Amino acid sequence: MIEALSAHEIGELLRELAPQVLGAMVRRYGQFGACEDAVQEAMLEAVSSWPARGVPDSPKGWLLTVASRRLIDEVRSEHARRRREQDHAAATAPLQPPGQPQAPGLDHDDSLALLFLCCHPALSGPSQIALTLRAVGGLSTAQIAAAFLVPEATMAQRISRAKEAIRASGARFGMPGPDERPERLGIVLHVLYLIFNEGYTATAGTGLTAPELCGEAIRLTRWLHRLLPRDAEVTGLLALMLLTDARRAARTGPDGSLIPLGEQDRSTWDSGRIAEGVALVSAVLPAGQVGPYQVQAAIAAVHDEAESIDATDWPQILGLYELLERLAPGPMVSLNRAVAVAMVAGPAAGLDLLRELESDRRLADHHRLHATRAHLLEMSGAVPDAVASYRAAARRTTSLPERRYLAGRAARLASQEENSAAM
C-alpha cells in the first residue's frame, strides 16, 4: 500500500486514472459501453474501499483488474441468460477464459484515443460533452446531471444513447489517421471549449457560473496539452481558459448578482492564472500558424493586462477581432467586434454594425444582441431606447442572474430618466 491519502486526494487520483483504465479496457476488449460500465463500477468500489484499506501500490493495476472481473462477470451472466432463453449455448464466447484476469496495458496510455472516441463525429454535441465528462473526466452521471441542471435519469439516457451511437457507428478504438486527425482534434477542442463556456456562464439556473465545469474543462485541456505540447491551438485553448477563468470570482457579488467587466474589482483577478495564460499565448503566437483559440486568448490577455476598462487597448482588441472574424466567422464574433468598434469609434459606429446583424437568424432574437444594443444605446445617451432593449434582453435570457442584472439596469435607467424629467 502507498501512503495514506485523503478522500479528496483519492478522488483526484481516480479522475486522473479514469481515462487510462478505460482506454486499456477498450483496447483489450473492444466493447466501449460494457467497458465504461465496468470501469465505473471499479471506481465506485475504490471510493468505498481505499479510504479504509489504503490505496494499492498499483492503483491503475487494481482498477484494471477489478474492472476486468466486472466485465467478465457481466458477459458470463449474459451468456447464461441467453442459454436459458434460447436453450442452447450462446453464440459469442466469453471475452477471456475463467480465472484470474491480468491487468491489461499497465505500460500503455490510450487516453488520447479515448478522448477522440468520445468526441466521435457520429455523436451529437450534447452527447460528446456528456460522454467526455464521464469517460475521460471520471465524473459520475449524477455529477454531470447536476452541473447541467437536468435530472439524473435524463443524463443517464443521454450517456446510454451516446454509447449506442458509438457501437452502431462501428467506430474503432485508436488514433485517427493523419488525414483525419486535424478535423477530429478540432471537434475535441470544441467540446472542451463548450464545457468551459457552460461553466463560465451557465445557460440556465440560479447561478451565473458552474465552477466545477470550468475546473474540469481546464483540467482536461491541461492534460491534453501535456499529450500534445506542440499543438498551437491546444496551447491557445488552455491559455484562453486560464485567462478567462482568472476573472470568474469577480463576476458575481456576495449575493450572486452579476458584475460586468467594466465594474469588476480587478485586484481580485487570479494573477497566477493570468501570468500562466499570458506566457502560454506569448510563446505560441509567434511560433506557427495562428488559429481561433490563440486569437481569443490574445484578446483575453489584453483585457486581463489592462488596469481598467478605459485603459484597455481597444484598437488592439478590434484588430484581433477582425482577424478572428476572418479565421472563424460567426455571429457572436461579429457581435463582439461591434462592441470593440464602439469603444474605438463611438457607439453610433457599433450600432450600425448591430443593424447588419439583425438579419442573421442565429442572432436576431438572442438576448446578447439586445443586451449589446442596450449598452451601446446607453453609451450614446438614448436612454428610453436603451431601457426597452435591456427589457427585451431580460425577457430572452434563461440565466436568472443575467435576467436580474438586465432588468435591474433597465429599472435604474428608467428611474434616472424620470427623475431628470421631473427636475
Image (spheres, grey):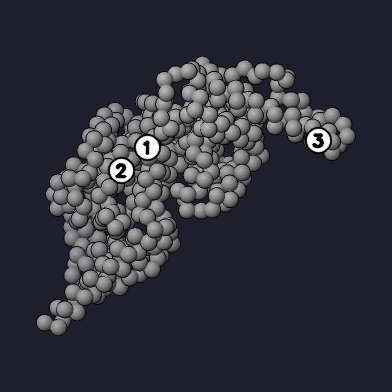
Among the two numbered marks 3 and 1 on one chain, the one whose residue lies closer to the N terminus:
3
Which quarter of the picture shows residue 342? bottom left
Q: Amino acid at mark 3?
A: Arg
Label 2, label 1: how far apart the Cα atoms are: 9 Å
Q: Secondary structure at mark 1?
A: helix
Residue 203, percent from left and from top:
41, 55
Is the C-beta separation of discs 2 and 3 under 8 Å? no
Residue 162, percent from left and from top:
59, 43
**Foreground residue among 182 and 272:** 272
Which quarter of the picture shows residue 263? bottom left
Which quarter of the picture shows residue 36? top right
Q: Residues within 10 Å of mark 1 (few under 14, many from 20)?
A: many
Residue 416, percent from left and from top:
18, 74
Among the two numbered marks 2 and 1 on one chain, the one whose residue lies closer to the N terminus:
1
Q: Is residue 382 above or below residue 92?
A: below
Residue 166 in view, yes or no: yes
Q: Residues within 10 Å of mark 3 (few under 14, many from 20)?
A: some
Q: Is residue 412 above or below residue 200?
A: below
Residue behind mark 2:
245
Is the C-beta separation of discs 2 and 1 under 8 Å? yes
Q: Amino acid at mark 2?
A: Asp
Residue behind mark 3:
82
Label 2, label 3: how far apart the Cα atoms are: 52 Å
Q: Is residue 284 above or below residue 302?
A: above
- In the image, taking residue 124 as reference, residue 85 lies left or right, namely right
